[in-house]
Image (cartoon, coloured by chain):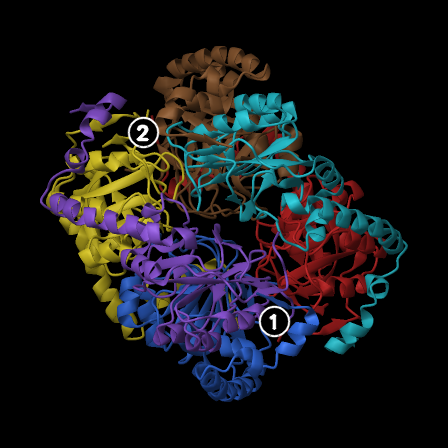
Chain colours: A cyan, B purple, C yellow, D blue, E brown, F red
Amino acid sequence: MTELGVVRRKIKRANRSAVEALGRYGVATVHEAMGRVGLMKPYMRPIYPGALISGTAVTVLLHPGDNWMMHVAAEQIEAGDIVVAALSADCVDGFFGDLLATSFKARGAKGLIIDAGVRDVKTLTEMGFPVWSKAVSAKGTVKATLGSVNIPVVCAGALVNPGDAIVADDDGVVVVPAAAAQKTAEAAAAREANEGDKRAKLASGVLGLDMYKMREPLEKAGLKYVD
Amino acid sequence: MTELGVVRRKIKRANRSAVEALGRYGVATVHEAMGRVGLMKPYMRPIYPGALISGTAVTVLLHPGDNWMMHVAAEQIEAGDIVVAALSADCVDGFFGDLLATSFKARGAKGLIIDAGVRDVKTLTEMGFPVWSKAVSAKGTVKATLGSVNIPVVCAGALVNPGDAIVADDDGVVVVPAAAAQKTAEAAAAREANEGDKRAKLASGVLGLDMYKMREPLEKAGLKYVD
Amino acid sequence: MTELGVVRRKIKRANRSAVEALGRYGVATVHEAMGRVGLMKPYMRPIYPGALISGTAVTVLLHPGDNWMMHVAAEQIEAGDIVVAALSADCVDGFFGDLLATSFKARGAKGLIIDAGVRDVKTLTEMGFPVWSKAVSAKGTVKATLGSVNIPVVCAGALVNPGDAIVADDDGVVVVPAAAAQKTAEAAAAREANEGDKRAKLASGVLGLDMYKMREPLEKAGLKYVD
Amino acid sequence: MTELGVVRRKIKRANRSAVEALGRYGVATVHEAMGRVGLMKPYMRPIYPGALISGTAVTVLLHPGDNWMMHVAAEQIEAGDIVVAALSADCVDGFFGDLLATSFKARGAKGLIIDAGVRDVKTLTEMGFPVWSKAVSAKGTVKATLGSVNIPVVCAGALVNPGDAIVADDDGVVVVPAAAAQKTAEAAAAREANEGDKRAKLASGVLGLDMYKMREPLEKAGLKYVD
Amino acid sequence: MTELGVVRRKIKRANRSAVEALGRYGVATVHEAMGRVGLMKPYMRPIYPGALISGTAVTVLLHPGDNWMMHVAAEQIEAGDIVVAALSADCVDGFFGDLLATSFKARGAKGLIIDAGVRDVKTLTEMGFPVWSKAVSAKGTVKATLGSVNIPVVCAGALVNPGDAIVADDDGVVVVPAAAAQKTAEAAAAREANEGDKRAKLASGVLGLDMYKMREPLEKAGLKYVD
Amino acid sequence: MTELGVVRRKIKRANRSAVEALGRYGVATVHEAMGRVGLMKPYMRPIYPGALISGTAVTVLLHPGDNWMMHVAAEQIEAGDIVVAALSADCVDGFFGDLLATSFKARGAKGLIIDAGVRDVKTLTEMGFPVWSKAVSAKGTVKATLGSVNIPVVCAGALVNPGDAIVADDDGVVVVPAAAAQKTAEAAAAREANEGDKRAKLASGVLGLDMYKMREPLEKAGLKYVD
């Protein structure tokens, strides 16, 4: 049961080198390596193009219009973490701006994933502090009600446990459970190794129909060619 | 980590009498008794007004355009269950219609919660088989890919573990973790007992400002009356 | 400039008999009589079909996730009023339920228009207390921050001044400035008188093309008939 | 190429008895019988529950905020037709109300399908004139620009040719090309005949897993049962 | 009451130097300095990143699919103005393109805020004429119906009076009533002065928890730390 | 009637030089030259700014969550084609990524228009392979069900026949029927010739009111100037 008013200080973070490895492959490859689960909804968009980060999740549960817990979360950040902010109900206010970003960055955070709004995007872009969010909004928030830090949360449709590995890039955000980080990094590596070869063949004009041997199953399924 | 291709046959269901008790209070009261967590997103709407059900979750994870696992889920239903269907990615096809409803009902299901589309709503209404869904759509689905049954799923933004208590009515759908069902039912009962009194006072014209003693805190917060 | 933390106790309400007259014509006719302005966005839907109300606006400005001001607004209600609740930022929490409805009704309110969520819709339906809202949600709210009562607000895209006439039915919600209520009621009456005649002609098979003398302007505009 | 400013008076309507037959099966069954194509998007909803109509399409192309062509379309209606209104760009104004409904009904129309807004829904409900629309809105429209009548249109994502068979019910709206109406009606009949039997078996507790012989293909696909 | 068919030629513009000052702080700071009111909905997005403008509002009310009034508005533009275009009903057609931008720019306009669609975005970007809009659409509009120029309008949820100060940047659009421009500029300046200091502290690793003295109120509110 | 499981190998492509000419004018101008029809819905956005392509359509109909037909479509691509992918029901999975892009590019495709999601957008941007899509999503798809290639499809609200001319840029996507390509290119050229002159006049400060001689019709329509 979701606990409110709780901050968990000790969390088990995913293996650092596995997390770094995941960051080399990007979201689409990691998501495939996971068996196509763990992806946040596609409405989560980066505030600027080109960023690619991987890190371990510090989670925070916020209430609509209230960002008090973001300050509590800041203290729990270790170098290499990514803050993952979930909401108890939909809200697109700007829960995060340049001051919090300065603080998060000073603590070692690599970025923010927030199922709500963000503001000061120009400054955040200049700082090189990437954020994936549901919206951009200048609307500020109050500091009046307790959420929690480092409890399991649902962020943009994905379950995130504190310490899970997070990978985010232009394609979106994927969550890898801490216990699966190493295995997923290996699966991603294998997949990637495989892709260079395929790419070269396709670039030379070989068709996927032939490379993946699809002609027979397509015919079996009933595909008909007409002129 | 979300497992694909798995059916868990033995699940620990929430205490039956607690689940029944929850059904007496409705979603808004249960959600308050939970401390305002566990609610599915408000886009989940009933296909007809007036239904109120409580039961234990049999969960199913589906892929876009594919309802094969619904048939697998049917076998895992026990009397008093509610099927909770989550999607691996957004899709509003009609994954469920009158034939599946006939089967689910015969197995003892009290209703369906589905983060996707449903069809045959006229017949389902006549059958009295309630469904809370994201959409109504006549679009059928194929039976080609494996999801899972009775694994933890995220449905309409809420985490649902198999066996959790589910309450659904015109206000939406709330999830109560199995271990918290009894305590929540008691909190809901206490809350409800309390409400009759308040309602009578308010009906007689007493203001919430006075009944809840809000005048002083409002003044302290700086509220000003002008003519 | 929108004032926060203010309650205006004396407001100039639209002429009562004009407001009652507006209620006889319904939203579409009143909106036409206004010259096609003043309509709230079509996402505002009634919680049950068939209600038609007219009244004078008591306005309230709320913040996301906070319904404190609803209790303050209750005290300002006079018989024949309709409460119009606007939000400082988008939020679909359930700001209003059966207890507040009991209080509003006891004070003489005819209904609620809220650019956010509502809950306890089954009970509200049984009470016959109509609500037009953006969403239905069981999600409760806190009581922590000051908004205002009886200031000008923008609700669902429409400007509402305290005391303005409000008409709401299955077609939506329209706002008539207090000073224009009488004139608009007369224009609506004239329009309505006119419609009975037209309806009878159309029912007899006469075409709008002929009744409205559209054939010539259509031809001028270049319309071509082909077989 | 979409022609503007054109009214086609002679259209080839789908076979009347086939159209009537289609109306006996409803949208979900007809859509299946079509091979799962021809469905309008699920945002098209009926203004009141329980209506089921089938008829032949009189199409009309409208521009945002302008319903002039609806009057032109009225003249082209024959008994048994359903008017299908498409928009040249998204708009949710109320293009249609009780006066046009009176006229359409007098001409023999069975209902309206409109990829935009409708108003006077209470009166339309009382008249028993069903409408499937994208929105309800009291916002009126002008009569200033030419669209066309009885040209091919795309309505809510579906291509509709004048004369095509349309079936609409609580599940949505499906389009059957005129030339395919007879064959589709037969396929629907065959499908329906088949369903009574299945329904009885499922009601008796037989599982779809067994009835459809799914256990073997599921096992082959790798499904695993765990306790 | 919203007047249609009216052009107000003499409007009282906000103090020029105050408006310029507001432009130095950006939307988020100005919005805070206003007390968190006056923000347009976050769906209003710039057509290219990095623009920051402030100016005085020339307002225009348009009808769906009709941009005639834009040409009327052009004549009312003075150097330093920003055109704010509101719609009488939702529409995302492209009401504005490179020709109108050329004209607006020649008249001295600094940009356009439009609660609808815009087109020719590549050319507008090359011209450096910034637009904040709800959508991008190539769909053209007609010139057939009268709206108004320089009347109070509701644009993207915010009330705008002609002459009000407008600030727009990557975070959105905020409206400052003309009479409040000077005071708001001062409040923004004070706020900004204050922020440099905070930023330096946070950058050095000081926590907001300590800098804002939040630990005590958090403890009072019941926050619990667990390991 | 939409055929499933069919690949048409011989299609009549729009005249190559007409298609190239269309590409010189961009979407807004071509759409005007068409008489304001043929535009896809404005939710279709380019994955990177600045691209402008024209080509001939190879169409493909996909089912939710299944991109098998994309491989079949690859074989039908000729140099200068643009692949137009439609969905049988709404789905935002990532149907297309860098491998398919490599293959399409090798076959001579100029870009992809897809009424669904796309992934690997960073790589696609680096490759300079433009895509207009409804969403960006890393979610992969299966290869299990038959759609069709080179049949008429409805993509983002527009009817596309194989061989039609497609123009896409920052303003969106427009479809020109093959038979109308030449005529439309000529109309676009005429329009464009006309625009340079207008632009120069407007840039010099001449008002559209005077250039288009609107003052008289505006006065006739009742426009009033007040001070």
Can you name the residue that lies furthest to the left here?
B204
Furthest-right residue in this view: A204
Closer to us: F117 or D122: F117
Quadrant that contains the N terminus of chain C: top left
A111 lies above or below A176? above
| Residue E155 shows in the view | yes
Residue C145 circle label: 2
Residue type at tag 2:
Thr
Q: What label sits on residue B142 in the rendered view?
A: 1
Q: Secondary structure at mark 1?
A: loop
| Quarter of the picture holding the C terminus of chain C | bottom right
- Which residue is at 76% across, 61% downward? F14
Confirm or deny contact between disc 2 and disc 1 (CB under 8 A). no
Residue D77 visible to an observer of this rendering = no
Dot 2 falls on a residue whose secondary structure is loop
The residue closer to the viewer here, F125 or E105, is F125
Q: Residue at x 12, y 43 (%)?
A: B201
Q: Residue at x 44, y 84 (%)?
A: D204
x and y, in percent, of residue D34 in the image? 57, 78
Q: Chain of mark 2?
A: C
Mark 2, other Cα within 10 Å: few <14 / some 14–19 / many ≥20: many
Q: Is residue B123 left or right of residue D219?
A: left
Subunit under mark 1 = B
Cα separation, mark 2 vs mark 1, equals 51 Å
- Which amino acid does the dot numbered 1 rest on? Val
Residue B13 percent across, percent down from the top left: 44, 61
Q: In the rendered view, would you say E128 is above or below B5? A: above
Graded by Cα atoms within 10 Å as few (under 14), some (14 to 19) or many (20 or more), the crowding at tag 1 reads some
